[in-house]
């Protein structure tokens, strides 16, 4: 009797699914940011990071600030390997991490990675994102872009990995 | 368009507070304007407020808004994660290592994917369904995907209520492997959820032929409880339970859960409760079983016990709804905040395109937002996708509350044809038929 078949049965009447993996990317561009620099904040769920990087050093099922803090350099390295900003023909922009904090959301605690993006002046930029897609195609990057008086939003997914950033 | 200033990591601005307060007001007082802001701004507000509010269930008096921060102590606990103390977690780790060592080995991938799906269902965490999907993705993109991979992917899609896509994969799997017991069982479940009982009957017969008599018996017994044959269903399930003494805890818990559900259909509350508890004794942390028992307790007017039952399960969206409902029934001071958080969580799901909680959203709109029209719209949309007894119930409740009995016509016809017996649903149906008669007779 295969235990795995129970997955089919016990879903019988309803799917009792907790929300899947979301990360939040907040960008400030254009006049609202000084000197053509794009300011970013990237909130990534500690649960998601633990699955990939195994942050729970003492294996007690609870991530403390000490454990997270000790892994933050790895977290940053992993995260920014999955984020790219390019200025078209002028090449890649530089992503410079500035600070790391903790942020509380409705569904758990997130790492908040702050960063600046330095692009060649007067270049239209695009952002490419593939965080977690290879291990979890249900991950979504929720983007909020502040530019001048406007707020724009986008949802990044395995099917939509790129957005154009407003000037 | 709302003007939003630049965020700074040190302190929230007055404008951010104003946005979040407005959002909080919208969410907890739905009698106010609901669609006041254009969609992008609403999403921005959501991202700002959901992203920045520390909304812990344990907090009572704290303001809903807090900026990112650096904890002051290494010992500060931040997040609970699956622990290696849990044997399921250890098993997943070792299967993951085995699969990483042999990435082209299909059986290793299926074992890992099935373990992820099983864990996903058990704790009510959709992340693991995503991990499972990634593991079998290489085979899904092959021209001739093996039947086992098709069935695992179908299970994942069914979990997300993508029933048509799941059905297509199951049909394909059965074409290449007509005696695949898991495929027949999954198809039977799908047909029952979608209210196609004749098809489910045939599927259950195939289950008996491919997976074995016991599985087929439980499958048929389950089906009967939807057809007004709850007594026979109970007798057969009791037989199945007696025959299952040596079976894995998961199977026994499933049968116990079905007995509980059937006992509720007969209005035998003590019997139902006995079997809900037995099911949970076998699988203590199972999200599906916990939520089923919570719904039973809510119906019996026992909300305080729901809070105890689900205290450690607030991470599951469906469990969280029952917690919020319990707070509302208790008229607790925290009820508005639980309602607000639930609304934020549903919106986050909608934002990311994971829109498969129609039934839960309808219940939320009716019972916590006191918005029968929205509840009815959601319940009707949900009915197009799934037709389990609970889906009928939410639609009937919403149609009554909105005083739109004609909106229930489809469900009333379905109940008449299938002959479902249920002590909660049938009175609702009677009331609606009476309203329809009054409408037809021109009565006030």
Image (cartoon, coloured by chain):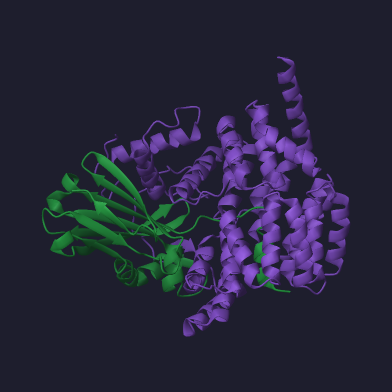
Chain colours: A green, B purple
Lateral position of residue B390 relative to residue A76, left or right? right
Q: Residue at x 70, y 38 (%)?
A: B411
Q: Residue at x 75, y 71 (%)?
A: B210
Pick whichever, B336 or A22, lies toward us. Answer: A22
Pick whichever, B22 or A122, lies toward us. Answer: A122
Pick whichever, A46 or B387, lies toward us. Answer: B387
Residue furthest out toward the bottom: B101
Q: Residue at x 28, y 48 (%)?
A: A145
Q: How many marks?
A: 0
Could you tell me residue B44's position as x and y percent? 35, 43
Q: Is residue A110 above or below residue B394?
A: below
Image quadrant where residue B439 sits: top right
Examine the rendering and report whether any part of residue B221 can be seen.
Answer: yes
Q: Is residue B236 above or below residue A50?
A: above
Q: Is residue B40 above or below residue A120?
A: above
Q: Is residue B367 above or below residue B55?
A: above
Lateral position of residue B196 relative to residue A107, left or right? right
The quarter of the image holding the N terminus of chain A is: bottom right
Lateral position of residue B355 relative to residue B72, left or right? right
Examine the rendering and report whether any part of residue A55 can be seen.
Answer: no
Could you tell me residue B264's position as x and y percent? 80, 47
Could you tell me residue B304's position as x and y percent? 68, 45
Image quadrant where residue B397 sits: top right
Could you tell me residue B6's position as x and y percent? 24, 45
């Amino acid at each position: 009797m295969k235990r795995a078949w129970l997955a089919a049965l016990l879903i019988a009447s309803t799917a009792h699914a907790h929300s899947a993996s979301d990360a939040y990317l907040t960008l400030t561009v254009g006049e609202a940011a000084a000197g053509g620099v794009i300011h970013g904040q990237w909130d990534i769920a500690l649960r998601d990071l633990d699955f990939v990087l195994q942050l729970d050093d003492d294996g007690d099922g609870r991530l403390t600030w000490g454990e997270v803090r000790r892994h933050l350099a790895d977290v940053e390295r992993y995260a920014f390997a999955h984020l790219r900003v390019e200025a078209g023909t002028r090449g890649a922009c530089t992503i410079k991490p500035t600070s790391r904090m903790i942020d509380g959301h409705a569904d758990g605690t997130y790492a908040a990675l702050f960063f600046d993006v330095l692009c060649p002046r007067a270049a239209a930029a695009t952002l490419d994102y593939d965080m977690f897609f290879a291990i979890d195609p249900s991950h979504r990057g929720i983007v909020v872009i502040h530019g001048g008086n406007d707020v724009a939003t986008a949802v990044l997914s395995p099917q939509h990995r790129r957005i154009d950033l407003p000037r | 368009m709302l003007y939003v200033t630049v965020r700074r990591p040190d302190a929230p601005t007055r404008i951010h507070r104003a946005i979040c307060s407005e959002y909080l007001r919208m969410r907890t007082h739905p009698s106010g304007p609901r669609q006041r802001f254009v969609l992008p701004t609403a999403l921005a507000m959501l991202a700002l407020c959901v992203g920045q509010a520390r909304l812990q269930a344990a907090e009572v008096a704290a303001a809903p808004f807090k900026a990112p921060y650096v904890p002051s102590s290494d010992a500060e606990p931040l997040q609970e994660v699956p622990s290696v103390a849990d044997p399921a977690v250890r098993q997943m780790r070792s299967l993951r290592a085995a699969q990483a060592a042999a990435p082209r080995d299909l059986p290793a991938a299926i074992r890992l994917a099935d373990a992820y799906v099983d864990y996903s269902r058990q704790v009510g965490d959709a992340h693991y369904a995503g991990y499972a999907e990634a593991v079998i993705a290489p085979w899904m993109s092959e021209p001739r995907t093996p039947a086992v991979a098709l069935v695992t992917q179908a299970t994942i899609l069914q979990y997300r209520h993508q029933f048509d896509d799941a059905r297509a994969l199951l049909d394909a799997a059965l074409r290449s492997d007509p005696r695949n017991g898991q495929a027949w069982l999954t198809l039977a479940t799908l047909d029952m959820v979608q209210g196609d009982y004749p098809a489910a009957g045939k599927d259950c017969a195939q289950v008996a032929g491919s997976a074995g008599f016991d599985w087929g018996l439980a499958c048929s017994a389950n089906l009967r409880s939807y057809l007004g044959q709850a007594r026979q269903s109970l007798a057969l399930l009791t037989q199945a339970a007696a025959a299952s003494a040596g079976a894995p805890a998961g199977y026994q818990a499933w049968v116990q859960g079905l007995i509980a559900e059937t006992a509720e259909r007969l209005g035998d509350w003590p019997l139902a409760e006995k079997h809900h508890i037995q099911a949970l004794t076998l699988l203590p942390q199972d999200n599906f079983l916990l939520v089923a028992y919570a719904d039973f307790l809510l119906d019996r007017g026992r909300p305080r016990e729901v809070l105890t039952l689900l205290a450690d399960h607030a991470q599951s969206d469906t469990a969280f709804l029952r917690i919020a409902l319990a707070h509302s029934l208790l008229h607790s001071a925290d009820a508005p905040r639980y309602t607000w958080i639930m609304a934020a969580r549903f919106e986050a799901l909608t934002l990311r395109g994971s829109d498969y909680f129609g039934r839960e959203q309808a219940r939320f709109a009716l019972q916590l937002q006191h918005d029968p029209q929205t509840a009815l719209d959601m319940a009707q949309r949900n009915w197009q996708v799934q037709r389990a007894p609970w889906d009928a119930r939410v639609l009937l409740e919403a149609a009554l509350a909105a005083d739109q009995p004609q909106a229930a016509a489809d469900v009333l016809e379905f109940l008449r044809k299938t002959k479902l017996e249920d002590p909660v649903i049938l009175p609702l149906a009677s009331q609606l038929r009476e309203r329809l008669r009054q409408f037809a007779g021109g009565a006030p």
